[in-house]
Amino acid sequence: MKIGKTKLALAAGLAMGLGTASASAEDTIKVGILHSLSGTMAISETTLKDVMLMLIDEQNKKGGLLGKKLEAVVVDPASNWPLFAEKAKQLLEVDKVAATFGCWTSVSRKSVLPVFEHDNGILFYPVQYEGEESSRNVFYTGAAPNQQAIPAVDYLMNEEGVKRWVLEGTDYVYPRTTNKILEAYLKLKGVPAEDIMVNYTPFGFSDWQTEVGNIKKFGSAGKKTAVVSTVNGDANVPFYKELGNQGVKATDIPVVAFSVGEEELAGLDTKPLVGHLAAWNYFMSVDAPENKAFIDEWHKFTKNDKRTTNDPMEAHYIGFNMWVKAVEKAGTIDPDAVIDAMIGVSVPNLTGGYSAMMPNHHITKPVLIGEIQADGQLDTVWQTSGLVPGDEWSDYLDGSKDLISDWRAPLSCGNFNTKTGKCGGETVATQ
Amino acid sequence: MSAMRTYSVAVVILGGALAVALLSLLPAEHALHVPGYVVALLGKYLCYALLALSVDLVWGYVGILSLGHGAFFAIGGYAMGMYLMRQIGARGVYGNATLPDFMVFLNWQELPWYWGGFNHFGFALLVMALAPGLLAFVFGYLAFRSRVTGVYLSIITQALTYALMLAFFRNDMGFGGNNGLTDFKDFLGFSLQSDATRAGLLVASAALLSLFYVVCRMLVGARFGKVLVAIRDAESRARFLGYRVERYKVAVFVFSAVMAGLAGALYVPQVGIINPGEFAPANSIEAVIWVAVGGRGTLVGAIIGAILVNLGKTIFTGALPELWLFALGGLFILVTLFLPKGVVGLWDRIMARRVPAPPLVAAPVRQPEAGE
Amino acid sequence: MRKFLVTCALVLFAALAANPAAADPVEDILTGFASSKYDDIEKSIDALAASGDAAAPAILDALSAGDLQVSSDKKLYIKGDDGSLKEARSGADATGEIPPGLKAVKVNNRVRRAIDAAMGQLTLLSPDPAKRLSAAASQFHAPDPAQLPAVESAIAKESDPAVKRAFEQARAAIILVKSDAPDADKIAAIGLLAARGDEDAKSLLDAATASGSPAVADAARGALKGIERSLAWWSAAQNVYYGLSLGSVLLLAAIGLAITFGVMGVINMAHGEMVMLGAYTTYVVQQAVMVAAPGLTDYALVLAVPAAFLVSGAAGIAIERSIIRFLYGRPLETLLATFGLSLVLQQAMRSIFGPTNLQVDNPSWMSGSMDLGGLAITYNRFWIILFAVAIFALLTLVLRKTALGLQMRAVTQNRRMAASMGIRTGWVDSLTFGLGSGVAGIAGVALSQIDNVSPNLGQSYIIDSFMVVVFGGVGNLWGTLVGAMSLGVANKLLEPVAGAVLGKIVVLVLLVLFIQRRPRGLFPVKGRAVES
């Protein structure tokens, strides 16, 4: 019967482990932070955890929310996708958080989505993504493809006169979808198929000699060529180093990236890369009083005046302020009331304007195109004249062009098919 | 190891799971209610325990250190995932009855041929067991026939799972690429989000684990098991005595792979996602570590190790999010240095000191020294 | 030299004289830079270049470096590196207060291209041959028939043969795009471009095949065939070079493991973290040099090599003394302990240096590339190949020719015998492990030049390293060399055909099959030691 005792001890340990997590005062409002602090994604996500802690700290200094202090609950899903789901469940069921800010990769969001829908939680997702999703329980504060990719291509076409396109991406769903959308868009604009080259490389790819060689070859056919890069995270530094060393200059073959921000550039000597582009909704270099205040606060909070800010941080800034406003409007943290109150909420963004939450749970944003500078910053060279609303169901994909999303009553549907007049899927049933 | 101890382990696992499952169905206000979070966690742990059991069978008893068992686990998981994807039917976001969502928006026109049949559970079940088994057979046959042993074998099993990971990452493979398969709706007609289904899955995992535990116990207790240990301790000698070493090895390897595959299959509906990350070599190494922590070559140690380490991970990633890797890494180092026989060995040592003469149970048969 | 200056002055004078000076048109042009529209700035650049004003090159240089500033009353200034201000046109120091509303003139890629083209025109006759060469190149890349006379006069005056050839090629490019050039000239131009034989020549000839004159089109097609043939050869050679370069990276990553795993039999899962330590050391050394002796920043990398060796080596010895030595004879358990150790080390780096990538600069002698025939050879990869080979040679020497090497081999082959001969086996074990780890640290210095310096650095190389050592044959340094190079070349030859992902999968599968055929790798070590 030895084993029986072992089991009992285990059960006691389990109970204790969970107990410590749930034992805390009831007079705070808990906010979950679900960002990887270890593993491959820690490199990007740790900063977002820090910025959330800063925002919560600031809000508490202003007196908290609904008369209560906010309390951050930080967990580490360790870049492990099933662990994301487990930790999301812990935040919602054990810690009973009022809202969660988290996830970076699409797969982590997909992994936690059923948990948030089942437990009726609220997730703020701060990263640009491929679209093709709209959940009642998720607010997407990053860019949809129409808020990043398409304006960037327009810029290259009009401003740089690009005729030939290399779509270079990491082989996963965001680049695949973005490139499908761009291919359709470019063909619509009359670019022949032989002037588009699509190439995919694995995650964390580090030997770019062949690919950069091919880009040079493709670009020497006499037509102005540009690279649209959806290369992800870790693979970017070796990619840019190889571009610099093989002498691919921005004036010859500009590279516009959707996943390279100030944070990634901080690990690079950017002098050989001056003039290559990035498309985002925020740059650290933007000259706006809100931005200056935010950067100062950030430097003070991290006690490091060299720390950069980037677009997903702004998305959390917007998302957090929207949530605060919605909770104040609803007068409660009850998820249903807050979800309803969120739509239409408008808060200042960091580029000197306002961003509003739309009925499809995406937000309005300006689109900025910036060029890499020698000091590692991105300098705006072009921006949309107004705000662009996020379009979750792309108009350029066959499957999704008839779908719309509207979470207001009476429609209250994330994937309403305007042709058939039906709300597809089960998203409605889970309410 | 007495039959009584064998069965008591099985009874404890099954009984415990059953009790937790029933308590979870109590109304939430009830004092003894077990939250759904715990049910999901335990279900996951038990699947890991089954994977650990399969690793212990080949490592603890035959001396094959496989660093690729995660591949069998993941393949079983993918087979289950494909079945679950097909069950979604027209309820996907695009309302396409035949194609899973990820194929619709990447413009696939028709279902690839290898997705055929997965709408039948029977067929899917067959694949969950046979696909890992077949892979293990081909791989094992080639490797053991050429007498690839020791670290060489470990490294090429690692290469195997690494290659599979890269392959499944490719979107062109038609398995959903990096995102893998998600957004499952129901399993055999039961909604995966309901508490009852989750309780049922927990009991099913416990039942499968108990069953395989008993089978493994019988296997290693029988003459077959003695040959396995002989191969582990002195392979050449076993061969000279006339045993067809390769056949034994292939047989155990295939059986173990099937076990791992089924563990993966039960894991997927409980965590709600299967993606190429499960093939990551680090996952397979972790499974080996669970076994080492629990106690190699004891079977029950594998189960305890898997549960202990994962429990620790659950607690530490919540309680010490920035430091937990120190704790986990430190644990691995300390266990290998100071507990060469794992937790079970420690337990035996403590019991031996406290109780001079073993009670009721017959004198414990010393496990032969591992091939150290 | 004097002749040049005189000519320059004459040309400039002629240009100035051509503009009847009403109100000084150049000042008018310069006010265009105050615009916030890139169109206006581009037009101003073109006009400034056409004006041939003496201050134009300096102004354009400043513009492209981001040092051209404009005040709110549309006056232009050039900011020096020391923060001083000079009036752009006159070059005189700006006196008095800082002009109000001073800000940099904005530049984007289109503007940069306009600057390049303008500089191409302005520096055709520059006294500096390097500037003339780049002027010729910019004329070649953007052939403009209007520039033909200027290029031809430059050819006539050119004395440097390399620059002269470049000008002639530029002239050929211009003639090919000039619609009214005589056929005979065009055919001669085609001949010149065929001799150049690169991708740029190919794209010009491609365009020429569509020429209205059949003779020209035929000549272009004929020349194209030759170019394509030679380009195919060069591209094959280029792939082999890429392969060798990848192979040398693999060799560097694996060679330390070839000692700790290959020679000592320790399955060292923390090997990648030793590489990572080396990369972080490089970062620290570079930062320190930047602060202490900014002039030597370019050579920080050289200093980092011994530093990384010492840091990783010391870490290795500490690990051996505190963990590994208790696990000899239990190779599979070293795997578990070192795996735990790798987690701890990764997290430690994350806690100390933060989770983000750190910036390790390429020194100037490792930046850029050179053309060798049709091969593009990047300096960083080239140095890494040399470095890998040097490390390999050095290590072979240490193992073969030194007392330590002899003792190492003795201990690994027969520990008890070695001990009875008076070798302090424990000490030798520590040093061997330290050597392997130190070499891994040196690899980290090289990898910091091409990859991320982040806590995950080691993880991305550990599996490949094990494959290389096992493929080459455990316990054999030459096997590691051959293994690394053949895996690198195989990978790079497959990549253009199958793509990066599939190529790697194919290599892995082939490797698994190879081990089935030859269970002890390419160069198995024979003897009793390996059987146990």
Image: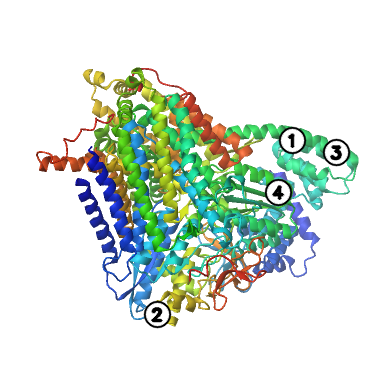
Q: Distance between the residues labelled 1 and 4?
A: 24 Å
Residue receiving disc 2: A332
Residue C228 numbered mark, or none? 1
Residue receiving disc 3: C187
Provide the secondary structure element on which disc 4 rests. Answer: helix
| Quadrant for the N terminus of chain B in the image | top left
Q: Distance between the residues labelled 4 and 2?
A: 66 Å
Residue that appears at 33% across and 59% down: B21
Provide the secondary structure element on which disc 2 rests. Answer: loop
Label 4 amino acid? Answer: Ser
Label 3 amino acid? Answer: Ile
Between label 2 and label 1, give the one nearer the viewer.
Answer: 2
The answer to whether residue B181 is above or below residue C243 is below
Q: Whole-percent x and y of residue A406? A: 57, 73
Chain of the residue on which disc 3 is drawn = C
Q: Is residue C243 left or right of residue A79?
A: right
Between label 1 and label 3, give the one nearer the viewer.
Answer: 1
Few, some or many residues within 10 Å of mark 3 (<14, 14–19, 20+): many
Q: In this view, does C294 lie to the left or right of C5?
A: left
In primary-sequence order, the first of circles 1 and 4 is: 4
Between label 4 and label 2, give the one nearer the viewer.
Answer: 2
In primary-sequence order, the first of circles 3 and 4 is: 4
